[in-house]
Amino acid sequence: MARRYDKTAAKRNDDLGRTTIFSPEGRLYQIEYAMEAISHAGTVLGVLAKDGVVLAAEKKVTGKLLDLSSAKDGGYGGSGEKIYLLNSNVIGGVAGLTADANSLVNYARSAAQQHLLNYNEDIPVELLAQRLCDMKQGYTQYGGASYPYPLVLYSASAYYQLTTPPLARTGLRPFGVSILYAGYDPHYHFQLYHSDPSGNYSGWKATCIGANNGTAQSLLKQEYKDDISVKDAVGLVLRTMSKTMDSTTLGSEKLEFAVLTLDPTTKQPRAKIYRPSEIDALLLSEGLTKKDEDDAEMKPAASA
C-alpha cells in the first residue's frame, strides 16, 4: 500500500512540473503559476478613451545608481522595462518576467513589420494580439513532455524547426507575461486588448494587470465613463495608480506613461511614451506630486 502511494505521489509531482499534463482536477498548474508570478509584478493600467488610449505602469527596477540616460535623452522614451512601442500604431505594456517580455516584444515588432511589407499598411491591433497569443498558446502544448515529432519554435525574425530525438523532453514553459495592447486601426479605431500566458486575449474599456489589479479594477468601475476623453483618462489613470501602487511616492523614477492619439493634421496614430521630466510635469499638473517634495516645502514654513 505504501509503495502504491509513493508511486502516486511521484506521478503527481511529475505532473506538477509538466506544462502539457492536466492534473486530476483538470488544471494546468504551470499556467496558473505563470499567472501567479504576474500578479506580483509591477502594475500596468490601461484606459480606452473616445479619442485615444492611455497606459501607465509601475517600475520595479529603481535605484540612484541605475543609468537612465537612454530614457532621458535617447530612444523613443521610457526605460524599456514596462512600456514598449510595438509599431507606429500599437503600444504594449507588460507585467511579469522582463526577459520573456523582451522576446515577445521582438516577435511582435517583427510580425508588424512583416505585415507592413506584405500589405503596405499597419497591422490591425487585434491581429497583432492574435499572432502573439498563437505563439503563447503553443508553449502550453509542447512543453515539458515527451514529444517524438519535430518542434517549431518562433523567434523574433523567423521560425526554426528543431528535430528533437524521439521521446526527448523539450523543456519549454509558458511565457510568464501578460500584455496590454493599446492601438489604433482604421477599421475599429482605438482599441485596448489584454493577453495572458494561456494564449487568451480579450478587449477592454479599462483594465489592469499585475499587483493590486483587483483594487484598480474596482476604482475603474466606479469612475470610468464611456464618453471619457484622453485628458480625463490621463487624470483617471494617474489617480488610480497613486492609490494602487505599492510605493508611497508617485514620481517618474517609479512610473512609466504613454498615450496613443490621432495626429490632428495627418489623421495618423501618434504614440507618445513620456520621458521622466514629462511625467513629473504631468503629475504636477494633476496635483499628484511626490510626498517627499511636499514635506520639504512644508519644513521651511514650519520653522519660520
Image: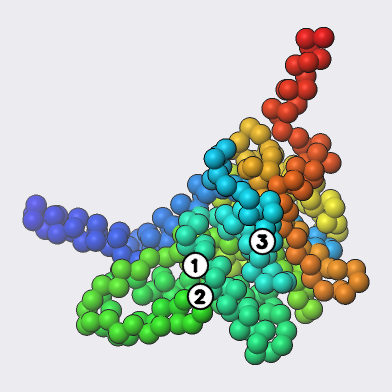
Image location of residue 50, percent across then percent down: 84, 63
Residue with the most extreme right position: 265
Give the residue displayed 31% in from the left and 68% down from the top: 171
Tell which circle, 3 or 2, labels the residue nearer the N-terminal end. Answer: 3
Give 177 or 156, whichever is nearer the viewer: 156
- Position of 5 with respect to 80 (left or right) is left
Q: In this view, does 290 lie above or below 53?
A: above
Give the residue displayed 23% in from the left and 82% down from the top: 165
Answer whether labels 2 and 1 touch (C-beta < 8 Å): yes
Q: Distance between the residues labelled 3 and 1?
A: 19 Å
Q: Which amino acid does label 1 sit on?
A: Ser
Q: Which mark is residue 156?
A: 2
Give the residue displayed 30% in from the left and 59% down from the top: 16
Q: Can residue 55 be seen in this view?
A: no
Q: How far apart are marks 3 and 2 (CA)?
A: 20 Å
Q: Residue 75 carries which label?
A: 3
| Quarter of the figure that contains the N terminus | bottom left
Give 230 or 258, whichever is nearer the viewer: 258
Q: How far apart are marks 2 and 1 (CA)?
A: 7 Å
Image location of residue 298, percent across then percent down: 77, 19
Q: Mark 1 points at which residue?
A: 103
Give 272 or 153, whichever is nearer the viewer: 272
